Each structure stands twice: as C-alpha cells, then as structure tokens.
Image (cartoon, rainbow, N blue to C red):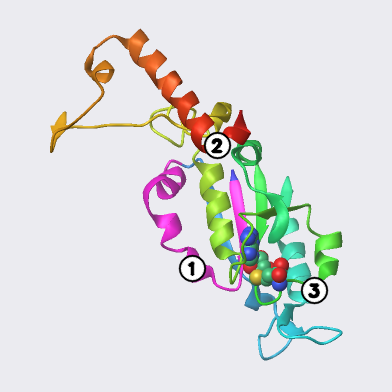
Amino acid sequence: MHIDIITLFPDLFTSVFSHSILQRSQNKGIVSVEFHDLRQYSVNKYKSVDDYAYGGGAGMVMQIEPIANCLKDLKSKRDYDEIIYTSPDGEMLSQGISNELSLMKNICILCGHYKGIDERIREHLITREISIGNYVLSGGELAAAVISDSIIRVIPGVLNDETSALTDSFQNNLVSPPVYSRPYEYNGWKVPDVLISGNQRLIDEWNIEQSLKRTKERRPELL
Ligand code: SAH
C-alpha cells in the first residue's frame, strides 16, 4: 500500500513513522509513505497557502489552488482509491473503516489547518472525510497519523504474529480480554489460575467470557 500525506508540517510525521510497527511495515516493503509539503505548491512568492474567509469572521482558510495543484501532481503519478480529508465532521473512524482502507492500494490524506479548507475542495476533489472524534484538533496531522497507524497494523504481514491484530479490540465487535505477564504474583496480586492451567480449551473459553463481560460493561453499544 502507498500512502501520500499532504501537510503544511511534514516534520510532524518524522518520528511517528520511524518507530515500531509503522517503521517495520516500511522496512518490510509492505507500506510506503510520502509526505508532501503543501507550501511547495503555493501560488505566490510568500509561499502562503491560506487567506481570509469570505464573509469575514476569525481564522484563515486554506485556499483551493495549492491543494488542487498538489493533488493534480500526485494524481498524475497514481490512481487513488480514496482521497481523504481529515475533518471533525467526517464519518467517525472505526476499526471497520480501518480494515476497509487497509485493503486499498493507494490512498491520499489531506491534513487541514486554520479554520479548515475551502469548501469547493471538499465538494469536488475529496472522496472521503474522516473524523477521529468529536473534538477539534489544531490540524489534521495527528488525525492522519492515527488513521494511518490503525490501517497499517491490520495489513497482512505487518504484525509478526498474524493473529495478533485479529484478537485486538473491535475485531468481532468485542473488546479485548485482560492480559497478564510474569511474575505470577506481585504484592499478593495473582494471575487468574486458568491462564496457568495449560488447558488451551479452558483458556480460550475464559478469554471469550472475559471479552463478552468487558464489552457488556464498557462498550454495550457494540453488542
Ligand atoms: N473550523 C473547523 C475546525 C478546524 S481545525 C471546525 O470547526 O470544524 C483544523 C484542521 O484540523 C481541520 O481542517 C482538520 O483537518 C483537522 N481536524 C481537527 N479536528 C479533527 C478531528 N476531530 N478529526 C480529524 N481531523 C480534525
């Protein structure tokens, strides 16, 4: 899969994509990611990409031309399955959406800033709008990183243990059961006996019971 990210702040992504699973996915050649500095597509000598809002009001608006020119350039090199705009009023990111996007070949994510982007870009050039929650961030970069991470970790071959993404929360509409590691006892707090019983059938049953119990308690809307 290839992900192009259009942003005013490419450096914000450097660390996120050069550690852990996101880095491994690129080293393995399963994912490639490129960051495109929107300022390079500015149409004036000041390298600005924003202007005052028509109708007045506080806050600047990201203009059409730099974004349209950047998209034109990228589209001449790749066919995109989706051109995503990160937006607080977009469809709410879910595991289902991440699973769906993880099957795609090329996606592009546009990060907004200031008051947002000129509406005409959303109407004519964007194919999908995604929100990461009902709150407002200063820019789309953190949202793009969240979206990319949740997509990349479910691409087959990215995680070492193939089953581990499938046993995470929200796959099968359940949250994950509790997990434990050594030592067996700390401060008098013990690991549930079933997990050291060696009986895989009982352990599997216990995990399912715990998943159901937790989902009922914490995320009843999933059931
Ligand atoms: N004026 C806009 C908010 C702009 S915030 C409004 O009230 O809806 C600046 C940028 O941050 C947005 O253009 C968007 O790209 C990004 N952003 C902010 N909150 C977000 C969220 N919850 N999910 C995804 N992107 C978000």
Q: Residues within 10 Å of mark 3 (few under 14, many from 20)?
A: some
Q: Residue at x 69, y 91 (%)?
A: 45
User: What stretch of residues is rendered in magenta?
Assistant: 2-28
- Please state the horizontal and vertical placement of residue 158, each as a whole percent of the image: 46, 37
68 in the magenta segment: no
Between tags 1 and 2, which lies in front? Answer: 2
Is the N terminus in the top left, top right, bottom left or bottom right quadrant? top right
- 3D distance between C-alphas at marks 1 and 2: 33 Å
Residue occupying image coordinates x 13% and y 38%: 187
Queried on whether the Cβ of the residue with tag 3 lies below 8 angstroms from ligand 1, the answer reads no
Which amino acid lies under the numbered mark 3 shown in the image of this protein? Ile
Q: Which is more N-terminal, label 2 or label 1?
A: 1
Q: Earlier in the sequence, mark 3 or mark 1?
A: 1
Marks 1/2 in contact by CB < 8 Å: the verdict is no
Is residue 7 on the magenta stretch? yes
- Choose mark 3 or mark 2, whichever is in front: 2
What percent of the width, then of the height, locates residue 17? 45, 56
- Say whether residue 55 is left or right of residue 183: right
Give the percent coordinates (x, y) of residue 30.
50, 40
Q: CA distance from mark 3 to mark 1?
A: 23 Å
Judge left or right: residue 61 versus residue 33: right
Which amino acid, by three-letter code, is at mark 2? Arg
Q: In the rendered structure, find residue 64 and report the number of the disc placed on it.
A: 3
Q: Would residue 143 be seen by someone viewing this image from the given angle? A: yes
Gap between marks 3 and 2 measured at Cα = 41 Å
Q: Give the label on residue 219, or none.
A: 2
Note whether 96 is above or below 8 in the view shown.
above
State the residue in front, 52 or 27: 52
Give the secondary structure at mark 2.
loop
Horizontal and vertical percent position of residue 40: 64, 77
Query: Dot 1 corresponds to which residue?
Result: 12
